Amino acid sequence: MHDVYLDSPYTFEVLDKMLSLYVNTYPENELPVGFIFMGDFISLKFDYNRNFHKVYIKGFEKLSVMLISKFKLILEHCYLIFIPGINDPCACKNSIPKMPILPYYIRKFKQNIESFFSSKRNIIFATNPCRIRHLSKKMIFFRHDILNDLIWSSTINATNNERNNLQNILVSTIVGQSHIYPIPHDNRILKRYSPFLFLYPLPHFICVCDNSCNSFISYASEDTSDCIISNSDMSFTRKKTFTVYSALHHEAKRYVVPRVKTILQISSTVAAARV
């Protein structure tokens, strides 16, 4: 899930419903291995004024209070991974890869969590993109409007406005170039970490959160089902959707948080279908 705006009360309502469904539906040993939250974590445009800092810190502090008071099982049995978005405060803010959120903004969040749960290993503030390995499956998560940058860099011809065509262009370019951000001449790429962006060999699951491309879940190519690529084009706060990847069964499904607390409703794009 991405664009989890922690300055919005509605976000906490949706998060509460989603996490409650997991806690109330599954026994402890069947809870997800982890939850991955991708930025932006604030709806305001980044600014150096005091109001931005206060709102940002307060959002994470409020999240910690909700987790401690209602979802102790999640804290005890699941990883919580936070990947910064375009608008989150990081060192070298516009660089690719993007560094983790600055400690100043999450200090209170960590202190609150650690006061309840002494182990720090379950809370991870990662880079963007972020690579994860679970069981035998390799995954990469990237929050960036890649298609928009491809168009502006004239790497592709954007005369065809068909949404499916743009989806195919995004997938084929990422897979064909074996690179999560296939614009090598972009001066935002930190050369020291450039090898980190390569996708060779292809991971089993590629999750890009690109607001400039439509949502989809598909195989990376028609010839193989070894790699699944997923995109979500709307913020979690607005659309209430999130993607679930099962490393055990190698499948990805998209869900929407229901209005009532019954069961998780599956959206129209549930299963990985061939491009």
Image (cartoon, rainbow, N blue to C red):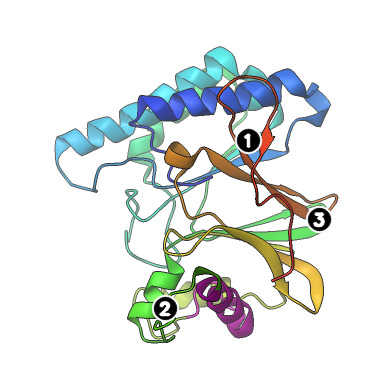
Magenta residue check for 169: yes
**Residue denoted by label 3:** 250
Question: What residue appears at the point 62 percent right and 80 percent down from the top-left corner?
Answer: 178
Question: What residue appears at the point 41 percent right and 73 percent down from the top-left corner?
Answer: 190
Category of crowding for the residue at label 3, using alpha-carbon neighbours closer than 10 angstroms: few (below 14), some (14–19), many (at least 20): some
Residue numbers of the magenta segment:
165-182
Say which quarter of the image contains residue 160.
Answer: bottom left
Q: Is residue 274 above or below residue 36?
A: below
**Residue denoted by label 1:** 122
Q: Residue 207 at what x, y percent from top left?
A: 60, 59
Please state which amino acid type lies under the numbered disc 3.
His
**Residue denoted by label 2:** 150
Q: In this view, does 148 lie above or below 264?
A: below
Whether residue 139 appears in this view of the structure is: yes
Question: CA gap, disc 3 to disc 2?
Answer: 29 Å
User: Contact, CB < 8 Å: mark 3 with mark 2?
Assistant: no
User: Contact, CB < 8 Å: mark 1 with mark 2?
Assistant: no
Residue in front for this viewpoint, 268 or 236:
268
- Which of the two discs, 1 and 3, labels the residue nearer the N terminus? 1
Q: Residue 73 at what x, y percent from top left?
A: 68, 20
Residue in front for this viewpoint, 140 or 235:
235
Q: Please give left or right for residue 225 compared with residue 100 in the image.
A: right
Magenta residue check for 72: no
Please state which amino acid type lies under the numbered disc 1.
Asn
